[in-house]
Amino acid sequence: MKIVKGWLLSAATLMAVEVGTIPPKVTIGGENGGRTDGKAWHSQMLQGKVYVLFYVDPDKKDVNEPFVQALKKHGFNHQTFGTVAVVNMAATWKPNVVIEALLKQKQKEFPDTTYVRDKKSVLVKRWKLADNESDVLIFDKRGRLIYKKFGKLSSKEIRKAIALIDKHL
């Protein structure tokens, strides 16, 4: 029994997104959610630019607002830098219809950010992200994870993340 339990734990760890690796391919679409334009979102889209991916419980949407403001202030070039906001809709009591309306509004307000609805916690399951949290993942131009933080970034972590983005542009 211990051997089976250890093997299952190892298999789950292998699927977890780890710094220095390209995460397993994931598609969010159809009944699982997708982009605000109704199309599926594919994790392979995290290539060609340096990307910051926010994976957020709607109830914790403001947790990393200081980091968002730091990114805006820095003024990264959208030709080489992108942001993706994936909303973990399964993590909240708020009705999906309300969240979807807010996301469409956000998409119009911030057209350079890709907004994705994750209705069934797909990334929590596939990448072993923190559920009911505000997760920050940074990917290099090849789609390799170069930074991850589950929860609120401190001022020091924000400076480190900004420097890491600059380094990989």
Image (cartoon, rainbow, N blue to C red):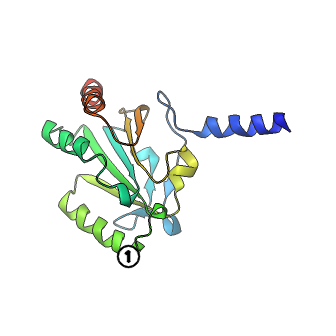
Quadrant location of the C terminus in the rendered image: top left
The number of discs equals 1
Residue lying farthest right?
1
Is label 1 in a helix, a strand or a loop?
helix
In the image, farthest residue toward the top: 167
Task: Report the residue at 34% width, 52% height from top.
Answer: 85
Side of 97 relative to 6 (left or right): left
Pointer 1: residues within 10 angstroms few (<14), some, or many (20+)?
few
Q: Mark 1 = which residue?
A: 97
Give the x, y percent position of residue 41: 43, 56
Query: Given the image, on which type of amino acid does mark 1 rest?
Result: Val
Q: Residue at x 25, y 26 (%)?
A: 163
The answer to which image quadrant residue 144 occupies is top left
Screen quadrant of the N terminus = top right
Given residues 31 and 129, the one toward you in this image is: 129
Residue 76 is left or right of residue 137, and the answer is: left
Whole-percent x, y for residue 20 in the image = 47, 27
